[in-house]
Image (cartoon, rainbow, N blue to C red):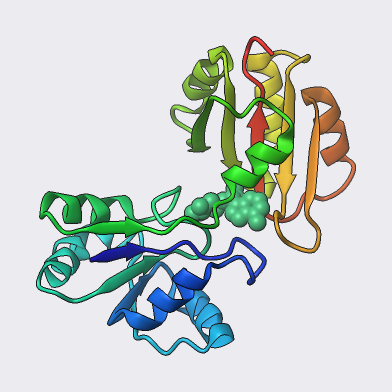
Amino acid sequence: MLYVVPTPIGNLEDITLRALRILKEVSVVYAEDTRTTRRLFDHYEIKTPLRSFHAHNEHAVVERVADDIAAGTPVALVSDAGTPGISDPGFLLVRACVRKGVRVECLPGATAFVPALVSSGLPCDTFHFEGFLPHKKGRQTRLKYLATLPHTFVLYESPFRLLKCLEELETFCGADRIACVARELSKKFEEVKTAPLPELKAHFSAKEVKGEIVVVVAGKSE
Ligand code: SAM
């Protein structure tokens, strides 16, 4: 069995009782950055051995890890924050397990886009999750496509690129499109602001933008 285990995106209390039990019971936990996961483990007194599983070794180790699991080793996979596989390593290992007939259980839990989407006040019955846009090549093409979607879409963005992103969204979606910037969710300085794009730009230009950010944008018809 491979357990895919979501971990908090800020507030250490945002982890389920089941996640804590499984992290204690498995033989090994594969982690994106073992130092980050070690802090969570220390907080909850989890002593399970940690091994590295990140974007740079994912391709190389995926078959070996999947074979270990197939041979009977119970394994959990975590990323630095939120749900593995969501803009984080995980997909390749899950796919390898599925192909080998190994059972995969992804626990329900923390992820950044759900609280951002729900608290934005924008329609969340149908939505598109985009994650990170490419930094350079393909960025404009992607934005042009997103601007045509009739439903809400969700981006992950770095604080350093937020203003550029809002500027680009205004160019492609128009100045009357409503969007939401959800910053530092579940943390002390959480901020969720929903407004037309020019107003968001003005708000976030007034001070240095810090922290982790999700941008939620209304669909074309809204
Ligand atoms: N696996 C994670 C998930 O399930 O959401 C996403 C990992 S991705 C590498 C990190 C990005 O998620 C950040 O750059 C930001 O866009 C978003 N994010 C993570 N934590 C956040 C938080 N507390 N508040 C707002 N956005 C957050």
Q: Is residue 144 left or right of residue 3?
A: right
Q: Is residue 133 visible?
A: no
Tell me if residue 138 comes above or below residue 91 in the rendering. above
Q: Quadrant of the C terminus?
A: top right
Residue 204 on image: x %, y %: 82, 40
Residue 103 can be seen in this image: yes
Q: Nearer the viewer, residue 144 or 129?
A: 129
**Front-most of residues 177 and 41:** 41
Above or below: residue 195 compared with residue 71 = above
Q: Give coordinates of residue 26: x percent, y percent.
A: 31, 79
- The answer to which of 87 and 97 lies nearer the viewer is 97
Identify which residue is drawn at 52% across, 89% down.
Answer: 45
Residue 69 on image: x %, y %: 17, 69
> With 5 as the anchor, is 155 left or right in this view?
right
The image position of residue 189, as x and y in percent, is 81, 59
Relative height, residue 221 to residue 87 (above, below): above
Residue found at x 78% / y 43%: 192
Question: In the image, what residue occupies the spot 64% across and 70% down?
Answer: 13
